[in-house]
Amino acid sequence: MPKIIIILPYFGKFDSLFTFWLQSCAYNNTIDFLVITDDKTKYNYPQNVKVVYDTFVHLREEIQLLYDFKISLETPYRFCNFKPAYGEIFQNYLEGYDFWGFSDCDMLFGDIMKFIPSDWSCYDKIGKFGHLSLIRNTEENRMLYKENDAYKIAFSTNRPLFFDEDAFPYLFEKHGKKIYPFPILDFMPRLKELKVLNDKLGNRMSVFTYEEGRIMRYSLYENKIVSNEYAYIHFLKRPIEIACNGIPQSFLIVPNQFINMEPITLELIVKHVGKGIFWAYWRNSFKWKNFKDRLYNRLWGNRADRNLIQCMRRKIDGAG
């Protein structure tokens, strides 16, 4: 199997989900993880997680040295635009690896290696999304993001242009490079219920579990419980309450909570569907600053972002 390193720059205080993220790294003990952070909390880092302490300002200055134009990296959140460049930015850490990758920490990993194809050497990218993607570690792939200068739009704009999920995969497609998708669980953020996106099973009544390194979905189909396993679970814009005891090896994932494990029954699934208003999301959305941002995006920002994303695609096509 391939040798893999997954890279996470994160600045600010990690939230309560991070200890669970680290546990999911530990179960993937044949994969290495690199965390660059300024949070010096004494976490119990697993042996396969290397932590490098740095400041956001210093790392931003180091990244700026790679480019002859002024980058826009105003906040750590904008690292999402720079993920395709991690193969160059963090190249000193990549020697000996077959794949380097980028991920988020508002997620839990399942058994990643189980979902790596046996013919992995035929693929240049494994994973479709910015939550987790693995890039084959070649010089060509490390520099592919620079082709036709589309990246300069993303790197010089303080807007979420989804360079990691739109223009970057498009570059792979343009070069005929094969992409292998992970099976994942991702949820619509505005709803209390865990309404699944990007899963061919759709939105059956379900509960989800973390079971000693595996991510499982138990859903109702024709009045029977069906189980399916996934590479990871992602909690986009979804604060999670930790309501289980400690950091158990297995636990239930129900609407916006981790709770102690119980036997999976039809009654349990029905009990935890979680219909209703997701107050935590909407309270945050209607804070004055967030409300102003949402209003700006509705009136102008989203349209401007779409135009810039299309401009990047035209550059990749050689027409920009």
Image (tube, rainbow, N blue to C red):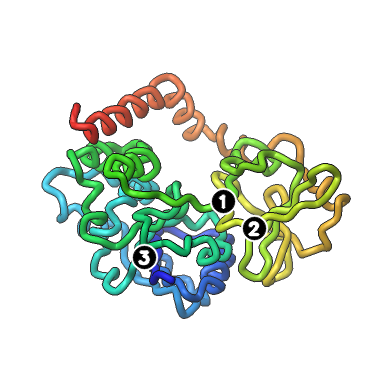
Q: Which element is circle 3 on?
A: strand
Where is residue 212? Give x, y as percent.
65, 70
Where is residue 274? Give x, y as percent.
76, 42
Identify residue type, mark 3.
Ile
Identify residue type, mark 1.
Ile
CA gap between label 2 and label 3 equals 30 Å
Q: Which element is circle 1 on?
A: strand
Q: In the image, which disc is placed on residue 36?
A: 3
Question: In which quarter of the view is residue 188 placed?
Answer: top right
Where does the N terminus fall, quadrant-wise? Answer: bottom left
Q: Which element is circle 2 on?
A: strand
What residue did someone put label 1 on?
Answer: 184
| Vertical placement of residue 64 versus 197, above or below | below
Where does the C terminus fall, quadrant-wise? Answer: top left
Where is residue 186? Give x, y as percent.
58, 46
Q: Nearer the viewer, residue 210 or 41?
A: 210
